[in-house]
Amino acid sequence: AGAQTAVAQCEVTQGIRTPNTLTGVLLLDKPPGISSAQAVAKVKRALGLVGRDARIGHAGTLDPQATGLLVVLVGKATRLASFAESGT
């Protein structure tokens, strides 16, 4: 559900999603049974980000069976990963 909301709120240019313009922080309620990397991969697909130039990642890691808030960083916001992880 979180990824679908993010897609609805992403920037659209002339009707086409442009990965270069997507920048921001998503707060994802990670369900149990998937790893943090798998959760980010689902968000990446939902946002239509493809290829090596698609910048997306997460701050911190949750165990696959854990639920909780996963901070997902997109585009230029990926530069904030070290700050999000350290809490400073």
Image (spheres, helix red, strand yellow):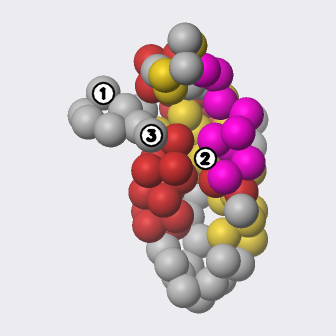
Q: What is the C-alpha distance between the residues marked 2 and 1?
A: 16 Å
- Asked whether residue 82 is in view, the answer is no
Q: Which residue is mark 2?
A: 72
For marks 2 and 1, the one nearer the N-term is: 1
Query: Which residue lies at the image location 25% right of the left edge and 34% below the top edge?
Result: 52
Q: Is residue 1 left or right of residue 15?
A: right
Q: Residue furthest left?
A: 52
Q: Is residue 76 left or right of residue 6?
A: left
User: Tag 2: residue type?
Assistant: Val
- Asked whether residue 25 is in view, the answer is yes
In the depicted structure, whether residue 32 falls above or below residue 52? below
Q: What is the C-alpha distance between the residues marked 3 and 1?
A: 12 Å
In the depicted structure, whether residue 63 falls above or below residue 75? below
Q: Which residue is mark 1?
A: 53
Q: Which residue is mark 3?
A: 48
In-front residue for pair 5/59: 5
Is residue 84 inside the magenta stretch? no
Q: Quadrant of the C terminus?
A: top right
Q: Secondary structure at mark 3?
A: loop
Density class for disc 1 (Cα within 10 Å; few <14, some 14-19, many ≥20) is few
Q: Which residues are magenta?
A: 4-12
Residue 57 drawn at (x, y percent): 48, 45
Q: Secondary structure at mark 1?
A: loop
Query: Which residue lies at the image location 26% right of the left edge and 36% below the top edge?
Result: 51
In-front residue for pair 74/86: 74
In front: label 3 or label 1: 3
User: Tag 1: residue type?
Assistant: Asp
In the depicted structure, whether residue 44 falls above or below residue 63? above
Task: Tell me which secondary structure the magenta stretch mostly adopts.
Answer: helix
